[in-house]
Each structure stands twice: as C-alpha cells, then as structure tokens.
Image (spheres, grey):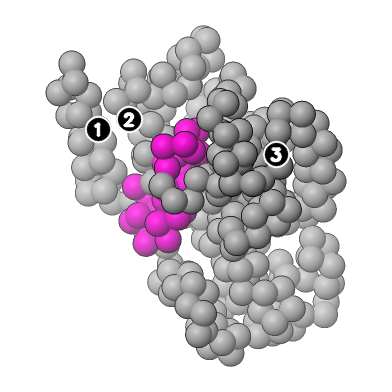
C-alpha cells in the first residue's frame, strides 16, 4: 500500500512537471523577484526592468493609483511607484497580476467557485501581511505572496486535473475532509502541488515551504513562525466568510501551532481570534479595490 502511495505521488509530480507543462512566470516577473531579493538593487534598476514590459507597466501604475493605495492620479512612473510604495509592494503587484494571467482558463466545477476562491486567496494575503506586520516584521516581505498562493495547488488541480478535482470536490461536498479526499483520489495534496509549482517558478524556498506546510507549520523548517502565521491567517479568512477555498469544513488550529508562537515570544493565543477577525475586517475593507482590480485582470 505504501508503494502504491509513493507511485501515485511520483506520477502526479511527473505529470505536473513534464507532461502538462505547467506554465512559467513571465521572464520580467521572475527577474523582478530576483532583483527585489537582492539588497543591492536600486529603484532605478528595478524600474528599468519593469518598464521593458509595457502591459505590466501600465497595470502596475493603474493599480498603484487605485483607491487601495490612496494615490489616485499621482503616481505617473514605475520609478515613482517603487519609491512611494516600496520594492515589496510592487513585487506583490507584479506577481499577483501574473498569477491571475497564468490561471485565467479555469476548469468548471459545481462545487468550486473560482471567483470566491480568488477572493479567499487575496484575503489570506492581506491577513498574512497584517499579522506579520504586527507580530514578526522580518517576514513582511514574504507574507502577502505566501498568503496569496497558499492554496494555488487547488487551481493547478482545477485547470489541469479537472476530472480528478471534481471527484475531490464531490467527496468534500459529501462530508469527507478535503485533505483526505485529495489523498484518496490523487495520492498527494494541493499543498504539495503548490510547493512544486513554487519551485518551478523559482520562488524563494521560504515561499514553497509555506505552501507545503500551511496546514502543519510545526513540520516546516527554520521559518515556522511565518508558516504558522499563514495558517492562522487562513483560519481567520475562513471564519470571517471572506471568499471560499473550496473547503466545506473549517481548518483545525492544532495546539502545536500555538506552541510555535509561544516558543518564539509571540503573544498570540486562542483568546485573540475574535480581535484579529475584527482587525482583519477593517484591513480587508481597505483592500476591496485591490481585489476587484485583480479579478478584473487589470
């Protein structure tokens, strides 16, 4: 039985990486991520790269001038956007726009609303950044992307394994836990597929790790705090009713997650859930124009 499971995992990974040819990120976006991660990069050099892609330039400027950022009509160049908004925010914009483009041809599933899924994903990015800004700022640069992409494996399944994905969603709708349904049908999980995609896109290892372990952060490596905050952000989004990840049941917050916070001097406890939900409502309300912009494809 173990051999069969390993064979299933190997089969899915092989298909995911080779046969179906998962899409790559645009070259400009890949280079942009590398530049932002380099502390020696200047705003001028980053703006020069982004400006080689006229469509991306126009969309970043339009988004930078949206109500979410509060600079309506004031930001006229990419260089100005970088200076005013910061490297990481511009990176988040570019990557978000590219992810929506890559997965624009979605499969159909009566139990999976893609519009509400993206709403949940953006909400988790917003919640993740809110939590890291408050509790562990050293992860603020990665938080939005990690939150946005945490369930990206489901989109891969929906678009490239639609028959199997529909089986999974049908099982979940009939009371089987989503994670168990994935293992039953595929022999692997959306978390692992998401991590494979992050690796293919050459995203930082911290991102692929957060995707892989966002339901069990205690199994991750040295960045357990970030992964635990993504896990908590995901939970906050579920109980707030922001979007729908396709999961019928609420994620379970294990005691091990709270222990990660305690062991790292972070004062987050079960009793804080309600106050964080209220803070998230306020933050998400600000981000509504950002979400609308992305869902309308810029």
Q: Which residues are magenta?
A: 196-220
Q: How many marks?
A: 3
Task: State if disc 2 and disc 1 touch (CB < 8 Å).
Answer: yes
Tell me which label, 3 or 1, sits earlier in the chain.
1
Can residue 126 be spotted in the picture? no
- Residue 126: x percent and y percent? 69, 50
Task: State if disc 2 and disc 3 touch (CB < 8 Å).
Answer: no
Tell me which label, 1 or 2, sits earlier in the chain.
1
State whether residue 42 is above or below residue 61: below
Q: Residue at x 42, y 61 (%)?
A: 204
**Secondary structure character of the magenta stretch overall:** helix
State whether residue 169 is above or below residue 76: above
Q: Residue furthest bottom?
A: 44
Cα distance in 3D space between marks 3 and 2: 31 Å
Q: Between 200 and 162, which is closer to the camera in this rendering?
A: 200
Q: Between 65 and 135, which is closer to the camera in this rendering?
A: 135
Eye-nearest disc, 3 or 1: 3
What number is the disc on residue 268? 3
- Counting other residues with Cα less than 10 Å from the Cα at mark 2, is it few (<14), some (14-19), or many (20 or more)? many
Q: Is residue 207 located in the magenta-colored stretch of the structure?
A: yes
Q: Is residue 63 left or right of residue 174?
A: right
Q: Quadrant of residue 273?
A: top right
- Counting other residues with Cα less than 10 Å from the Cα at mark 1, is it few (<14), some (14-19), or many (20 or more)? some
Q: Residue at x 37, y 40 (%)?
A: 193
Name the residue beneath numbered marker 2: 188
**In the picture, which quadrant includes the N terminus?**
top left
Q: Is residue 146 located in the magenta-colored stretch of the structure?
A: no
Cα distance in 3D space between marks 3 and 1: 36 Å
Tell me which label, 3 or 2, sits earlier in the chain.
2
**In the picture, which quadrant includes the C terminus?**
bottom right
What number is the disc on residue 9? 1
- Residue 21: x percent and y percent? 28, 51
């Amino acid at each position: 039985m173990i051999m069969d499971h390993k064979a299933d995992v190997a089969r899915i990974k092989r298909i995911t990486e080779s046969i179906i040819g998962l899409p790559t990120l645009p070259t400009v976006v890949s280079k942009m991520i590398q530049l932002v991660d380099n502390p020696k990069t200047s705003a001028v050099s980053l703006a020069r790269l982004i400006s080689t892609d006229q469509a991306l330039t126009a969309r970043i400027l339009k988004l930078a001038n949206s109500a979410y950022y509060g600079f309506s009509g004031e930001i006229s160049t990419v260089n100005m956007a970088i200076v005013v908004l910061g490297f990481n925010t511009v990176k988040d914009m570019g990557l978000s726009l590219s992810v929506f483009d890559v997965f624009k041809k979605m499969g159909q599933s009566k139990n999976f609303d893609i519009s509400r899924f993206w709403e949940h994903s953006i909400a988790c990015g917003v919640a993740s950044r809110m939590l890291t800004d408050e509790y562990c700022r050293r992860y603020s640069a990665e938080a939005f992307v990690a939150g946005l992409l945490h369930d990206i494996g489901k989109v891969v399944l929906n678009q490239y394994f639609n028959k199997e994905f529909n089986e999974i969603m049908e099982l979940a709708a009939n009371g089987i836990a989503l994670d168990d349904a994935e293992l039953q049908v595929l022999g692997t999980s959306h978390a692992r597929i998401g991590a494979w995609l992050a690796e293919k896109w050459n995203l930082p290892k911290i991102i692929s790790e957060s995707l892989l372990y966002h339901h069990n952060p205690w199994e991750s490596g040295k960045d357990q705090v970030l992964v635990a905050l993504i896990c908590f952000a995901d939970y906050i989004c579920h109980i707030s009713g922001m979007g729908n990840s396709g999961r019928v049941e609420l994620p379970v917050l294990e005691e091990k997650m709270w222990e990660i916070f305690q062991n790292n001097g972070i004062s987050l406890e079960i009793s804080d859930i309600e106050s964080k939900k209220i803070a998230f409502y306020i933050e998400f309300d600000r981000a509504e124009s950002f979400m609308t912009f992305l869902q309308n494809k810029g």
